[in-house]
Image (cartoon, rainbow, N blue to C red):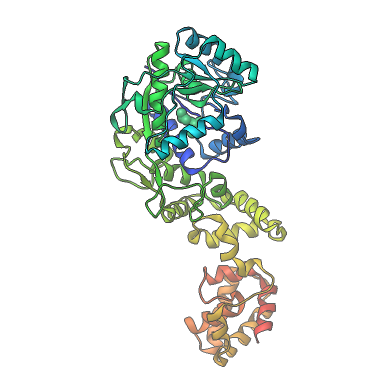
Amino acid sequence: MTVRVRYAPSPTGHLHIGGARTALFNYLFAKNQGGTFILRIEDTDLERNVDHAAEAFAEQLRWLGVEWDEGAYVGGEYGPYICTDRLSIYDEHIRLLRERGYAYDCFCTETELAEHREMAIVRGETPRYSGRCRHLTEQQRKAFLTEGRKPALRFRVSDDEVIHFADMIRGEMTFDAGATGGDFVIVKSNGIPTYNFACTVDDYLMKITHVIRGEEHISNTPRQLLIYKAFGWEPPTFAHVSLILGANGKKLSKRDESIIQFIEQYRDLGYLPEAMFNFLALLGWTPSEKQEILARDEVIRAFGFDRVNKSGAFFDAAKLAWMNGHYVRERSEQELLPLVKHMFLNYHKESKWLESDPWLLKLISLYKDKLNYLAQLPEMASPFLSDVLFPDEDANALLADDSTRAVLSEFAEQVANTTSWDADVAKATLKAVQAATGHKGKELYMPLRAAVLGQLHGPDLNQSLALLGRERILARLLYVQ
Ligand code: GLU
């Protein structure tokens, strides 16, 4: 059997961590098994669709390196892959279900249904559809239609049925059909099929072999299995991936502001796709070697549902930052350059420093080892980026001490006497200042750092001085003397 899996987002917002992890697990399983990964856009909930969200999903998946072999925007044998382009296909199948007696028109209004639900809750019962429209006479139907009511279509559920499936992560799952909420809507009164119906028809027609999706869909699976059964179709194998948990151990909520939720935000902050790929793969899957850093190919080779956890996966933002730092260091300065430029333009509209690639490359090289993500650079490197230096508290305290004067004035003089300026000249100049003043080590470096960089600690001093340039060094020394 050739594995065929799909990621089927609803284009109702941005790609978030959970969605990206689901897409990635589908992708990894497909690649591991030599199968096909499909992207389908489930846009049947018209009111919730957001313009251009589907394109943005696609773009972000591509950025992550989770490329699909077939589906929306790339085509394939089983298209179309956007649900609203498949309405005539659904119509045919709806007709079949009606003919076989599995579906009936329901004229209940939203208000009536809500009242019913509330009454059930008051009685302490689980709300379920009463079945009121199951046996309407032709006369009653006509009366509703004359009233102007537009029917929804409901799927007839036999209460005594027991539904089983073997979940790849959770093992055997059993549901009583009677506990699934009663007859459910498969076509809304606007004529558009619901997710459960469209998804089932699409998964079948697209020959999906494994449905891998978030745990929040477990309650949909029994309904979908009833639809498979009504059509006489063999269902796929299911895997419901566990929830992602925030630091408080609770399900990560899209409103939780303590965690950055959207892939796009990570990209903008200068997280690298290879880090996100590695990190997301470990959100619920553990490789047998217990390694943390795994290249794309290694993940693909090792991935399998036998090592996907049933319990929730903790989202550890600090681990992601650490991992990203690892990948930042793996990239060359040249590779980081366009990303850094993009970030400066996006966040700082400050273009002055963007004009000189060689200068920026040196800046990146000075800070690369200290960065977890690229958006940390502007603040970390502020002594190089801002015209006005604001020494920090420690630097100010040191500069207030008169004993620093000798070093600073000697240094100013030596710098002024140089004819060229680079890291080697800076090093020789420091040696000369040491010889002239007798100050060495910290007593030499700290006052200089404080005066020209505004901080007592930072990247390599010779390289920093070279990057800062002679004119700025002299201007800053003048200011503190
Ligand atoms: N459209 C659903 C969602 O975005 C996908 C459900 C499924 O994978 O079956 O959550």
Left or right: 224 in relation to 75: left
Seen from this angle, which residue lies furthest top? 99
Which residue is at 35% across, 44% downward?
312
Q: Nearer the viewer, residue 115 or 458?
A: 115
Left or right: 325 in relation to 464: left
* Residue 256 position in % (x across, y down): 49, 52
* Residue 302 position in % (x across, y down): 34, 35
Which residue is at 55% across, 90% downward?
401
Q: In this view, does 301 lie above or below 459?
A: above
Which residue is at 42% across, 27% downward?
30
* Residue 469 position in % (x across, y down): 66, 70
Quadrant location, the N terminus: top left
Locate residue 240: give its quadrant: top left
Quadrant location, the C terminus: bottom right
Q: Is residue 464 above or below residue 331?
A: below
Q: How many labels does the image show?
A: 0
Q: Which of 110 and 95 is in front in this view?
A: 110
Q: Nearer the viewer, residue 191 or 36?
A: 191
Residue 420 in view here: yes
Seen from this angle, which residue lies furthest bottom? 402
Which residue is at 53% across, 46% downward?
262
Q: In this view, does 399 lie above or below 177?
A: below
Locate residue 189: give its quadrant: top right
Q: Which of 137 and 282 is in front in this view?
A: 137
* Residue 310 position in % (x across, y down): 31, 39
Left or right: 348 in relation to 104: right
Residue 34 in view here: no
